[in-house]
Image: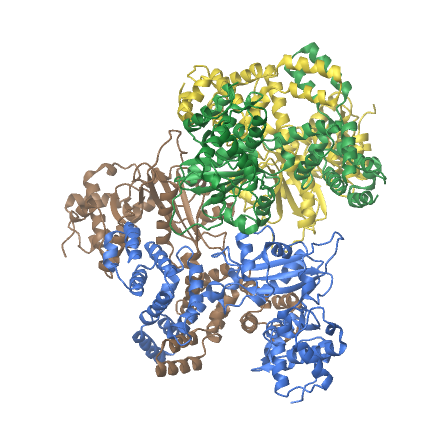
Chain colours: A brown, B blue, C yellow, D green
Amino acid sequence: MKSLSYLLQKLSTLGQETLDQFNLGSSDNFALGAGRLCEALLQLSGEASSIVIAEEIIRQYQASDEAEKQQFFGYLYSKLGADTEVVAEAITRYQADGDQGSLLALGSACESPRLELLKTLNTAAGGTQALICMREDLHKLPKDNPARDVLDEELLSLFRSWFNRGFLELRTIDWRTPAWILEKLIQYESVHEIRGWPDLRRRLQADRGCYGFFHPAIPGEPLIFVEAALTDEISDNILELLKQHPPGDDDASPNTAVFYSINNCLGGLRGVSFGNFLIKQVIEHLVHEMPHITRYVTLSPVPGFRRWLETAVHDGLTSLDSEQQALLEAMQSGVEPGSPLRDSAELTKLLTSLCAHYLLKVKSRGNPADAVVRFHLGNGAILDRINWWADPTENGLKQSYGLMVNYQYDRKLMGANHEAYQSRQALACSSAVKKLAGQAPVSQS
Amino acid sequence: MKSLSYLLQKLSTLGQETLDQFNLGSSDNFALGAGRLCEALLQLSGEASSIVIAEEIIRQYQASDEAEKQQFFGYLYSKLGADTEVVAEAITRYQADGDQGSLLALGSACESPRLELLKTLNTAAGGTQALICMREDLHKLPKDNPARDVLDEELLSLFRSWFNRGFLELRTIDWRTPAWILEKLIQYESVHEIRGWPDLRRRLQADRGCYGFFHPAIPGEPLIFVEAALTDEISDNILELLKQHPPGDDDASPNTAVFYSINNCLGGLRGVSFGNFLIKQVIEHLVHEMPHITRYVTLSPVPGFRRWLETAVHDGLTSLDSEQQALLEAMQSGVEPGSPLRDSAELTKLLTSLCAHYLLKVKSRGNPADAVVRFHLGNGAILDRINWWADPTENGLKQSYGLMVNYQYDRKLMGANHEAYQSRQALACSSAVKKLAGQAPVSQS
Amino acid sequence: MKSLSYLLQKLSTLGQETLDQFNLGSSDNFALGAGRLCEALLQLSGEASSIVIAEEIIRQYQASDEAEKQQFFGYLYSKLGADTEVVAEAITRYQADGDQGSLLALGSACESPRLELLKTLNTAAGGTQALICMREDLHKLPKDNPARDVLDEELLSLFRSWFNRGFLELRTIDWRTPAWILEKLIQYESVHEIRGWPDLRRRLQADRGCYGFFHPAIPGEPLIFVEAALTDEISDNILELLKQHPPGDDDASPNTAVFYSINNCLGGLRGVSFGNFLIKQVIEHLVHEMPHITRYVTLSPVPGFRRWLETAVHDGLTSLDSEQQALLEAMQSGVEPGSPLRDSAELTKLLTSLCAHYLLKVKSRGNPADAVVRFHLGNGAILDRINWWADPTENGLKQSYGLMVNYQYDRKLMGANHEAYQSRQALACSSAVKKLAGQAPVSQS
Amino acid sequence: MKSLSYLLQKLSTLGQETLDQFNLGSSDNFALGAGRLCEALLQLSGEASSIVIAEEIIRQYQASDEAEKQQFFGYLYSKLGADTEVVAEAITRYQADGDQGSLLALGSACESPRLELLKTLNTAAGGTQALICMREDLHKLPKDNPARDVLDEELLSLFRSWFNRGFLELRTIDWRTPAWILEKLIQYESVHEIRGWPDLRRRLQADRGCYGFFHPAIPGEPLIFVEAALTDEISDNILELLKQHPPGDDDASPNTAVFYSINNCLGGLRGVSFGNFLIKQVIEHLVHEMPHITRYVTLSPVPGFRRWLETAVHDGLTSLDSEQQALLEAMQSGVEPGSPLRDSAELTKLLTSLCAHYLLKVKSRGNPADAVVRFHLGNGAILDRINWWADPTENGLKQSYGLMVNYQYDRKLMGANHEAYQSRQALACSSAVKKLAGQAPVSQS
């Protein structure tokens, strides 16, 4: 196997003795070879030579195919678990003593050597990023693969510790940002696709703002970023907002930041939450850097509205009259952005009231069914306004019949809102939206 | 209590509701007040407002006196331990299932809310440094304080994770380094005191090298640093080396790096080992940046030699003849740097051979009794030479009758030496030192 | 006039008295208004308030139209010239004394207040860049405008002083470079057009190199940049070189840097030469950073070859036989990149020999007629090879029947070559090219 | 001569031919050797090889002794002056044409090759700094050395161009500043000596401010710096201000910046004025960064007061009564900081009124005789207050009987004050000082 002979050569400065010691000879089995390296690494832990081996393991891992990766995960799972005898002893001791010291010892006993290995892999150049990718690979394993959940949880616990909010750096992203970071925005933007560099440049002009969290160990990768438009009104139409006209010369004085897209970047960090912190920290940043900005709102999608409505109609949970039925069918038969349906006051009222109902009343396990509501109201925002014909694109019509929502972040009320949401599931919303929800033609249940 | 009313004011942007919720009212008991904040923090965890509270807790902690800190630690210990019922259930489930998933769950159950609290305190500005100081304060508690060991271990586990080698940055420290970092060198140098800024400057001149590890979260604090002299010989006298003459004009071409001092800086990070990595990484750095440097040695103290020898003589473990006895007594009666004893070949041989014996043969729990030997030989270095009259200062005489040792780091042999030491307690040393050890006048045991 | 009332407001912190002093009242004539500001500026020179006025002049200048700019240049020319009486006195004194002191005084007397004004405009934020643009605007004046040459020369003398090589910084430009600089490459590349960001990215990959000079006062603007391909051969075809295939995995080990494009960026700096320094400094950079690169060559166009040849044929300066005539006519009638003419040995020889003759023998005022030859041979390079069918694009065929040239930079010979060129117009070339030149079917003159 | 053979070796990459060309053979005369290099440099100007030669000239210059430097200056003066024939022709042409073009040509003709040489020396690494030192060396020449004034003026004109305010960077200097810059403060502070690093550190604490101008070509050298104390009153005593007590915990809220020391650093830049810009730019900086600071004053010495007074008394220009005479003699006989004379109202009034008279009425060539008055009032400041017993040190008593002055910078009035001073020699001062001046016992003249 070529990679190991390469290793032998690369490790030569460690002395032949080291290599013989670990019998890092040739092997025709990937996991076996990588496994020997892992064992070597665990024994050498804390030694400078361990970095060389960590880098070799990562190199081999990255060069391996899917089957080999699966082998490797299998190896980690089956060979590097915690020592059950030690756990048993620790349980016995804890049950005898019952003090916090023996509890800590029990906790330590539960930690697998695998965790130690992962920590040592992090010492390699590019190690942090490699481990994040490893977790992404892990998610591709069949769900019933026993290694999957265990390794996933271990990596997640590491990442939660390493990506502690105290270690993240908020950075302004603009046209002076290095290109290799900017291209990540194009790659990771999934809410409103960035169509190439001219579109990207538009989103970084003076009347826009883009902010991301970065971690010192992977300085070229945004972890999450949010895009805002600086306007003098609360935007009610995403197409208007995304238009690529340059800022006019008319010395506009924006007073509102409209957050229109927020994106997590690294799949391997799923479960480490950054979003709530990011929005709030960007607001604090704007308070200091742009004191003329005094309103902070979002222009957000309602991804599940249409699906819910169609099911509700089908299940007879709505009470539409025939005109309403006809209007809804007209929408369902497909419309163009310029359709005259846009101007139907009846249709507007029908769909916005149903949407208000959906957002405020439809629950899943006690919480709002809509993930976007959960996110923003959980953060302490207020559901402020529902906008008709706000995203009349194919995608917008498919998700929500073109409706979009403004959530408003009021710094004075955010804490209280968050608390009320957490403790009593109270949903903060404007009286207009509340009224709308009451007007929705739904059967009382 | 002033601090809480201050908090009430500061937190006002969170809304009165938040504060009432947590009943953050006035309290005349420090730990009680801080405790309420901690509980508030745990409930708000993940919220932006939590940073404000984390900063307030740290502010209050830093302003508190020793008794209050002890109260606070007591609070953390007694109120924020793991939930024992949950642990018991997790044990039961693990014992029933026996799989790695339930083991992980057990490990999680063992983690206390306290740990979560500490992680959240890290989100405050200056949080990392505050937690490091907190651990230092903890070490001042009476040893029998039950909080001490538990909190210490929890903080240590956090620090080991956060200060993973992969997150540290090796930096060259020189006269271009910001003054606030340089003054830390003066503060933390404990091997050979830096006597003010001129002495510091001398140690940063072109024929010297200073390198440290830094962590991005505390950029102004070296975690550990090592000082080297670049010479054309293996230094055998620390006073010569520390002399403050500037480098001559004679275009000296140094080929040897002599590491003469290595210092851990932050007491609160005790137990997170950086030293072995630092020396080896500095060597790799020199290999690339100063290819003319081809030898890497230390000039190290032997802190326990004299104490051991006096005990050994007292206990009859040595076999000194009367002349040797007289010479030793002469040394013990106190000598000056310029004493004629310096030139006594007999005395030289007596003490260097005893020292070789001490370094190689005297053990403590199977390992060399001398901590410096354990450190360097554990790193893979070779015990190369014992130097007579190398540190004839009061301190040097008191520690080791003025003897110092050169350990040599040979990149080709380091790995093998480390392995042999780890697995077989083999001590790598030059034939000269081995021979010396055989000549020591000690009773055979 | 709006801009001046704006000024009045903006300058209010200087006190009304200042403004009255200069009678910066309203004016309906642009140059008159700007002129008053200029006079104010000259009087205030050295004062902090002068920066405000300098910025106002630049703002007004940038907002003005072409006619107004012409007015402004006219004002500078006619009102701010040197004082001829002072010059006359200085001449008299110099002619009397004849010493260097009086010569210096004469030199000073020749300096116009305009020059002082330009220096003060440079103190404005963005002043340097504004002055560079001003010179570019100046070049748009009719050639017979008397202001044009005088102002041009004064600005050029300033720029030559300010952009002294000692103040320039060589920077590597790669994918980590800020986007606002990268977009300048797209804008300024005129040799081989960069077709958008993917093409740009290709040119910044690992097997490419891009380097530019920057000046601290305009950090976002490259002054000049050169693009290189790192290959394992001397490229003989620009289309191959520009192909957008990514570097293979085959661990290619390039040994040759092929400079294929060099571009001056700022028209306003025309006449301040950077090119010769840039190529040589990049070579020195590569010597240190990429020691495996041992050959430095160009792949350069021959912009005037076809035009010269057509004229020469027309003027009867060539001695083509009928077959050669036919081949040439075939080329002239237009060919495709894949034309079978590519494989005609006869045509190849005909055109390469004529090209060698053109490059080496055809002169203009004693120097080679071809500007590219003058540049590279003047730098000390060697005319190494003439490549057939190297640029079979419409542009390449139009310039040079698709021929391109490799110039080679040999660090050992560069100084001598430069000297020989400077002092004796000696043209360094390979024996192959020299031989080719001898074979060209040209009439002896 | 060793240095040239070193050069021969170093230049080898330029090819032997280059060296032979210039006959850079050995020479036993410094200026002759360096002269040949200079001629070589002028011929190679614009070539990359010229940097090597420029560096060699600077190296040789720096290694040379005073006599050799004088030789070198002599060489520059006598051999590299402008071509007088060309000047004569240019005069003739100018006198014939009389246009601005021929005037510019005359100006160019007056420029010596020496100037070109100096510009090329600037391309060497460290060239700018070397030229600045060269000018400092030049000032050590005997005043009657003809080279002195000519070279001085040429260097000054270069520096004025290169150190244009538009290229300078204002930097805050604090305890995070690199040590090699901080030590320059100690070296260059000449108003109130910095007594080592603890004193320096005191001056950089939170209640102090230090700011300097830097040039990108010599980033490690402040050109000029100013020190300020942030207080809540207008300081009237320099000893109080310099006291090394750390800022108290009492959350003082300073509203006044007291500039107590401003220092030009590089003797070689004498005549390039930075001071007026610096103070005003620091004020603008404070306006933005510390809006709570609303007053900007100085605490300045009166260096010539005592000398003037003693002469005035001697010359009978004062009208002291016998008591005043006695008080003055008591002061002259030497006093301690704690002397009871401090409390003499009569003496206070006598000296402060005489000082007011000295500052406002005593002139030299139409301007105030006191350089500090000229500087601050020329900048637009107001002479605000004269402080009794403000600097009772030996030096303070010797300069001004311990008096110091507050000049106040009022942003609203600065422009007008400056103008009035420039155009009408109007001296802005408080009514108190004006009144004091009227009370001085001086003979009317």
Q: Does residue D22 appear left or right of residue C236 in this picture?
A: right
Q: How many marks?
A: 0
Where residue A355 appears, as percent x and y from the top left, is 23, 48
Can residue D40 be seen in this snapshot?
Answer: no
| Relative to C445, residue B401 above or below | below
Residue B32 location in percent, x, y? 29, 65
Q: Can residue C317 be seen in this view?
A: yes
Relative height, residue D412 to residue B96 (above, below)? above
Viewed as shown, does residue B367 lie left or right of D27? Answer: left
Q: On the rendered structure, is D165 left or right of B11?
A: right
Of residue B114 and residue D412, the one placed in the foreground of this image is D412
Quarter of the picture holding the N terminus of chain D: top right
**Residue C316: x %, y % from top left:** 77, 21
The image quarter containing residue C89 is top right
| Residue that lies at the very extreme toward the front in this rendered image | D322
Residue sitting at 70 percent across and 66 percent down? Answer: B237
- Farthest residue, direction bottom: B445
Up/down of D13 relative to B146, above or below: above
Quadrant hosting residue D91: top right
**C443 or B160, nearer to the observer:** B160
Percent position (x, y) of residue C174? 57, 45
